[in-house]
Every structure is written in structure tokens, then in C-alpha cells.
Amino acid sequence: MSPSDDSPNAAAANASNDPWYKGITKYEWLVLIIACLGWIFDVFEGQIFVASMRDAIPSLLSLSPEHPDVSKWNDWGFAAFAFGGALGGIFFGMLSDKIGRSRTMIFTILFYSLFTLVQAFVTAPWQLMVLRFLVAMGVGGEWAVASAMVAEVMPERVRHITSSIFHASSVLGTLLAAAAGAYVVNNPNLGWRWGFAIGVLPALLTLWIRWRLREPEKWTKAQRAVEARQTGAAGSIGDLFRGENLRNTLVGMSLASIGLITFWGCHIYGKNALLDRAQKQALIAEGVSLTPPSKEGLSPEEIVAVMKPYNEAKGRAFSKHDTKKAEMRSMVLN
């Protein structure tokens, strides 16, 4: 063995060739799994409304699904959820700084699970809107706390990968909601109220959190530092808009806003466009002539074909630790 083999550079080179998951402890895996489950159930609670709204709102209004008032209430439901999620992220994020990540995670999951259950008993659309807002507060809070816990617990060298896994797990929540829509909401013996009722099940996750999770070491050290300074607080929302934090805060908010506006725009308009397309294709199959015959939008297969190289390129950029550049490029493409 040459002397150079024992050098720090050689050790770093060998470490870079190791699988990214090498060295991650069982507890760190546990944190990632629990955080992903919480995020999956967050998305489920949000998407179960999408699966139920074509039955729930018409039923509460005693109107047909095609009535304009049904569409208006559905839009109010999305708006209530968006505002509730934003407020919940801020409020519960601040709370987690004070009482701890794991305790706040337990509270937020119980919060959105119980209010989702209560939605099964509403008798008017406005009641459902209020509850959607409250559910979203819990969902936004849980996401903020879970993502912070992943960032604080996971080793820095794999943080970008584990954070990607955490956020990507959300698709499983959408699939769960789709399954609930197909087998519960659309089941004539069950219906939309049962779709909301099963939203209480994520509350069981809190038992596991209470049993296994401890506060991140970074959070504990921050609390000790606060106590040593006797300042009474680790920071405030106002601090984000002062001094050297201002630029990063504004850039972060801008990037997040672009991503969320893109997502919600596609989410709300896209489903209606796909439904419209399916209805037109059904009419064409029956021999009905539609005018104008021009093509409207892309098919699902075409969307997948267009997005595939984009997603692959983004994944390669993130895997090379080029996080800032990858994020900027993805926002421009959005």
C-alpha cells in the first residue's frame, strides 16, 4: 500500500464511491420512514376531498354534479385547503420550535385526522369548507415539522437524497386516496361520508411516534443555547425578514410560490381538462360529431413523454449535489 492511500483525499475518494445509504443508522431510517408515512397521510387527507367532492357537494346541496354552484363550492374547498395549509405550516412550525418536533408531529396528525373524521358528519357545504381549512392546518403543520425532522436527523452528506425520498413519497398518498375513491366513495353501500371517516386512521401513527421518536439533537442543542442566553426564544418570524436572512427568505418564498402555483393550477384545471377529454372521447366513440374538431391539450401519454426527460435531468442534477441550480432550472421549466 502506498503512503498516499492513507491520505485524507484517498479516504474521501473511497467514501464517495460508497453507496449513499451506507452508514445511515437504524434510528435515522426510522425517522425517515415515520416522516414519509406522515407525509403520505397528509396528502391522502388532501386528496380524499378530490375523490369525494363530486358526490359530497351535490349531495349536500341536493343538486346535480353539473350545477354551477357545485363547481363554486369545490373551488372554495381548494381555496380553504390552500390557505389553511399555509397558516398551519407557520403556526405549527413555530410551535415545534418551542415544544419539540415529535410532540408537534403527534399533535398535527391527531389534528387533521380528527377533523377529517368530523367531515363525515357535515350537513352543509360551509361546514365542510371550515373543516377543510382546519384539516389543512394540520396537514401543513405536519409537513413542516416532518421535513424539518428529516433535515435535522439525517447526515448532511445524504440530506438531499433523503429529502427527495421524503417528498416523493407523497405520490403514495394520492394513490391511497384514489383507491379510497374507487372502493369506498364509489361503493354504493358506503359512499363519500365513509371516505372521510377512514381519514381518522392516520391517528394510529401517533402511537408509534410517541413510542420511538426522540427530539433531534440539533433541536435539543438549540434549546440549550436559548436557555444559556436566557433570551426566552430561539427566533421569530420577523427575524426571517431582517439582515442577511431577508434575501434567502424572499428567494425561498418565490421558488415555493412558483412550484405551488404550478401544482395547484395543474391539479385543479388538469383534472377538469382530463374529465372533459374523456367525455368528448366517449361521445366521439358513440358517433357524435363534435365541433370544432381541433385538438385540445396533450393526452396523458404525451404528458408522460414530455415530462420523462425533464424528471430524469432533474434527478441527475440533485444526485450531483447541485441542489440550488437544479431547483432554479426546475422552477424555470415549471
Image (cartoon, rainbow, N blue to C red):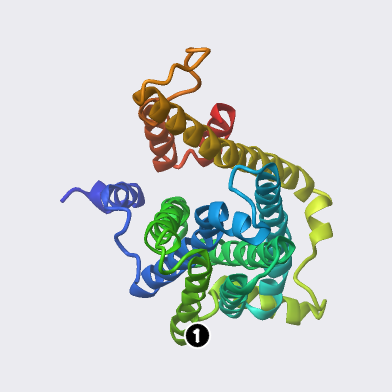
138 shown above or below 309: below
Q: Position of residue 74 (x, y in %)?
A: 65, 50
Q: Residue extending furthest left?
A: 1
Q: Position of residue 226 (x, y in %)?
A: 74, 76
Residue 225 vs residue 43, the one in the foreground: 43
Q: Is residue 67 left or right of residue 295?
A: right
Let me know if residue 87 appears in the view. yes
Q: Residue at x 70, y 39 (%)?
A: 254
User: Label 1 crowding class (10 Å Cα cut-off): few <14, some 14-19, many 20+?
Assistant: few
Residue 118 vs residue 47, the one in the foreground: 118
Q: Residue at x 54, y 56 (%)?
A: 55
Let me know if residue 101 appears in the view. no
Q: Which part of the image, by quadrant, shows the C terminus?
A: top right
Q: Position of residue 187 (x, y in %)?
A: 40, 62
298 shown above or below 317: above
Count of numbered circles in the view: 1
Q: Residue at x 67, y 69 (%)?
A: 123
Q: Residue extending furthest bottom?
A: 211
Q: Is residue 313 left or right of residue 226?
A: left
* Residue type marked 1: Arg
Q: Secondary structure at mark 1?
A: helix
Q: Residue at x 45, y 42 (%)?
A: 321
Residue 224 vs residue 72, the one in the foreground: 72
Q: Position of residue 300 (x, y in %)?
A: 40, 31
Q: Which residue is mark 1?
A: 210
21 shown above or below 252: below
